[in-house]
Image (cartoon, rainbow, N blue to C red):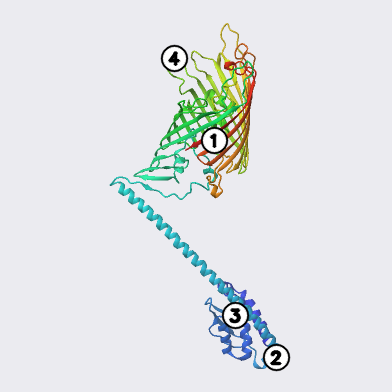
Amino acid sequence: MGVLQSVKTGAVEIGAFKRSIFYRKKLKKQVIDPALLGVFALLNAVITQRGGQGQIQAYLRRFGVKGRSVLFPYKRVVFESVLGGTLVLFPVPLYETSARASEASSAEILALRHEMAAMRREMMGEIRHLKAQIKQQNAYEKYHEKHEVLHVAHHARRAARLAQRMVVVQASQEEEPKPTFQEVSLPNDGPRSPAESRLSDLPGAPVQSWQEFKAASAHEEVVDIGRMKIGFPRGGAPTIASDDHAYAFSAGILAQNDVGGFIGVNPKPGEGEGKFPSVAENARRLWLRFLWRYKDWVINVTPGFGSNSLDGNIRLVDGNLNYTGLRNTILTIGYFQPRMEEESAEGSGNFEFVERPTVVDLVRNLAGGVGRFSIGGLHYEKNWLVGAYVTGRTFGDNTASDTTAVESQKGAVFRVAGRPYASKDVDVFLGAGGTTAFDVNKNSESGKITLSGNMEFPLGETSLLTSGALTNVSQIWAVGPQFALRWKKFLLKGEYYRIGIQRSHQAGVSALPSLGFNGWYVAANYTLLGYGRAYSPKRGAFTTPGVKYDFDPRANHWGALEASARWSVLDLNDVPNQGGAGVNGNKQTVWMAGVNWYPNRHVRIMLDYAHFFVTPSKGVSGNVNLFGRSGNAIISRFQVSF
């Protein structure tokens, strides 16, 4: 039996001790490994055989245990842990009687010494592990102490800045206001999130609600002068606002300058030459937008100094009052541009090409278009939009030069659009729009309308497309579906419209037939650099690509770049002689391709190419299109907006 039996008995006792309530409640809370207790028991048993209590205490001190050990046969040994300070009690027979101990052979003692050496190495490894844990815990505490100091310092600096601003406000009440510059930590040249990377709000864009305006001003660059703020809210338009943003005035600009020309548009024998310049310049849009705000009441006045053919032509684009106090709703009265088409809803500065497709440009001007007197509103949610307006004349129709006008046109515009499916990579868009002039202008030319369109190039060229002069028109309308599919950076979209003409009947005169025309377009777009085109819930349309980083070749930043292609058709021919004796309508087809580069959110450079074909019609003035015309055109546009 001997020492080995004592050790075995101690091991059994230790196992029972580990399962005891005392062990679970006391020992498990300590850092020291419970396995060491067995080692201590073994050491006591062995050392007792070899020479006394003094050697036991010396060995225990080497292994981190101090205190007293009382040696009685089959009694308890008390150890006090240096690491935990907890009394650990366990029963272990410490030694056998001298007579029985002397029976141990030398071979057993030698084997036991080897076992003790192995145990000592294992125990030293445990001690090193414990020391590493303690060191790691100390490092963790120092790390958190350091960051706590930094956190306190940050709040102290913030409090100091607030106190400095309070001093400025108090001083402004006693002396002349002095400008103070607010620090802005957000970079202006990127990186930007997709929502912040689009072109800034342009003239003609839906007005912001008061909540949206305050949110856009949260990170603006401002100069505080007394209780006024002068700065550039998100979007870029310079703004003067009161301290609480209840009162505000802002000004914006959209400037588009075009340079281009026509190639190969030559008249056939017997035709008039028409106007198709090889090189021409035009200020397409020079719009200045002025907004006055009191909370959710906004006045929008936008004069324009450009046109699709006569730059320098001054007109009113917008002159209206808006109320935005209802959630996601804009109510408008005044001269406005109600939009029934997805293409127009994108905004004049966001088109994929320099101009809208011909069919869109025609139907939008029936009862809508720029500077149309309108009363109505729109409501939008994340995935759907609905809008409706009652409309009247356009600005300038009621002039002193037209003394025969007796009554204004009355019409209406409506639109509904939404995304039945939307995800990060895919958008499915469906919509429908309609417009009607149910009571056309009444003057000396009452009931006489001529529908026409250019080749989707705003260079002052002769229009080759015409319906002929339509008489006795009592009502005109257009309605059609809209669709779009976005997959990641690729966008496919299109619209179709049916145009109807109703005619009045005069007594004793044979009734004129009603007419119906058709037009459509399909366009594809892919963003090569930057964020792809994205759906805007407030517009119900897809806006421009996003500029993540401003153009900076040294940093390998190139802005945003997109490529587009479009096919559009408009057929204004329905019945023979619809425009008078021998005058029929005709059909126009345009194929276009183009690229747009956005060096930043305020600048866009466009380059478009078009090939067009127009069937003949005697209704074109000057006999310019007696046998049909075809040709090509190239145009570039330089756009700046704030």
- For the residues labelled 1 and 3, say whether their Cβ atoms are less than 8 Å apart: no
- State the residue in front, 40 or 433: 433
Q: Identify residue for label 4.
A: 403
| In this view, the mark in front (1 or 3) | 1
The quarter of the picture where the N terminus appears is bottom right
- State the residue in front, 40 or 9: 40
Give the quarter of the image for residue 401: top left
Percent from the top left, x then y, of residue 241?
A: 39, 40
Q: Earlier in the sequence, mark 3 or mark 4?
A: 3
Q: CA distance from mark 4 to mark 1?
A: 39 Å
Q: Is residue 156 visible?
A: yes
| In this view, the mark in front (4 or 2) | 4
Rate crowding at label 1 as few (under 14), some (14 to 19) or many (20 or more) other CA atoms within 10 Å.
Answer: some
Secondary element at image label 3: strand
- Residue 159 appears left or right of 108: left
| In this view, the mark in front (3 or 4) | 4
Q: CA distance from mark 1 to mark 3?
A: 84 Å
Q: Identify residue for label 2.
A: 106
Q: Identify residue for label 3.
A: 90
Q: CA distance from mark 2 to mark 3?
A: 29 Å
Secondary element at image label 1: loop
Q: CA distance from mark 1 to mark 2?
A: 99 Å
Q: Residue at x 64, y 90 (%)?
A: 49
Q: Identify residue for label 1.
A: 350
Which amino acid type is marked by label 2? Ser
Q: CA distance from mark 4 to mark 2?
A: 136 Å
Secondary element at image label 4: loop
Q: Earlier in the sequence, mark 4 or mark 2?
A: 2
Rate crowding at label 3 as few (under 14), some (14 to 19) or many (20 or more) other CA atoms within 10 Å.
Answer: many
Q: Which mark is residue 224?
A: none
Which amino acid type is marked by label 3? Phe
Which amino acid type is marked by label 4? Thr
